[in-house]
Image (cartoon, helix red, strand yellow):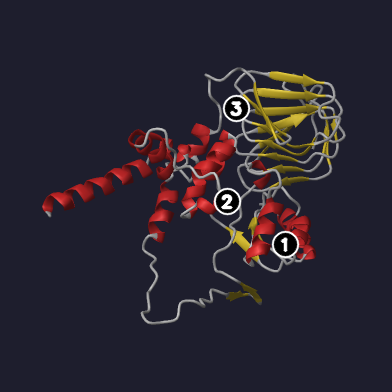
Amino acid sequence: MQNSTATDTARREFLKFLAASPYVAALGGVAAYLERNVLAQNTPGTSNVITDPAKALNVFDFEEPARRRVIQGHWAYMASGVDDDGTLRANREAFKHIELRPRRLHDATKVDMRVDLFGTTYNSPIYFCPTGGEKAFSGEGELAVARSAKAHGTLQVLSTATSTPVEDVIQELGRPVWQQLYAPTSWDACEKILRRVEAAGVSVIALTVDNTTGRNSETYLRTRGDDPNELPHRYATFINRVTITGSNNLTLTGVIGSSGAMQQLTKVGSGTATLSGNNPSLADTIFVNAGSLYVNGQQPNTPVTVGLGAIFGGSGMVGAITVNRGTLSPGTPSGPGTLSSGNVQFLNTGCTFSIQIAGPAVDGD
């Protein structure tokens, strides 16, 4: 019995060690790591990665298939916690202490999990949490989540950094969503957000207060795609999505996607990419997740989201710009310029607005 207890303890300590590793988190968690590095050695020629949702035994069975389908930088953003992922481990550890209380000899064939919150009844207390930029993980983004929430009669909470307008999501869901809010430091900007979601039908605001001073997402920063061993410029194109990665500089000229808009264009890696040309419908959305992206031309219908540590600038026109702890820098590295946008929104502290002044400095009030 003593040997068995010691072995069980050693196994638990080993799993805790794996859970603490940013490398393991980057691979998709402990289950994915074991599937790759341990279980695969014991079962050659087989794989535990599901290919059909119906074959999932628990929710973590979806983790590895999702990691394999999602761009590396996007997966790192979604899977990362704060610092060394201590918050992620603490959250999962806390849920291990929540148990179901069994009641014997009760009819369990008619379990009612409905819950009433703020005047709305949902079929289950399990709901869809807010995740920013869901089009980075699936072409339909928040609309696909809305259809699933509608089918299961459960709650959908929309992120401040949504990649789909709140009005479209509510229309797809068929009832109001809850709106998660990272309150901007400017009250005017905050009020505009609140008025818009109120007009769309949102009745509940989920205020997030733990991100006002920024965060250090180590796993995301380590694994978002800045790999010096990559080809200088690598494009991953699938389902009308294009990703620019690498650490060198790249310029694309002319009309891009003239036969129809891409679903999304994503910039990752530490290099600088420049789009030169007029594209009335370049993409449904542009994500600048790392490095720098400059637009020198007219892209009037394309919204842009600038992520943590990334830079967006140029001399031209784009749609709405959302800066989420990134830098908005009109002009180009070689000189100042004018960047026009229908709307600019800074979501959190930690954002930077960089201005270049043309001509000699003058005294003034």
Q: Secondary structure at mark 2?
A: loop
| Residue 30 appears left or right of 285 | left
Q: Amino acid at mark 3?
A: Gly
Q: Secondary structure at mark 3?
A: loop
Q: Amino acid at mark 1?
A: Leu
Q: Secondary structure at mark 1?
A: helix
Which of these two is toward me, 195 or 114? 114
Measuring 66% from the left and 63% from the top, which residue is drawn there?
151
Residue 212, which numbered label? 2
Q: Which quarter of the picture shows residue 129?
A: bottom right
Q: Which quarter of the picture shows residue 261?
A: top right
Disc nearest the viewer among 2 and 3 = 3
Query: Dot 2 surroundings within 10 Å: few (below 14), some, or many (20 or more)?
Result: some
Query: Dot 3 surroundings within 10 Å: few (below 14), some, or many (20 or more)?
Result: many
Residue 173, which numbered label? 1
Q: Earlier in the sequence, mark 1 or mark 2?
A: 1
Residue 192 seen from this side: no
Q: Position of residue 314 (x, y in %)?
A: 77, 28
Q: Amino acid at mark 2?
A: Thr
Residue 269, which numbered label? 3
Q: CA distance from mark 1 to mark 3?
A: 35 Å
Q: Position of residue 186 (x, y in %)?
A: 70, 52
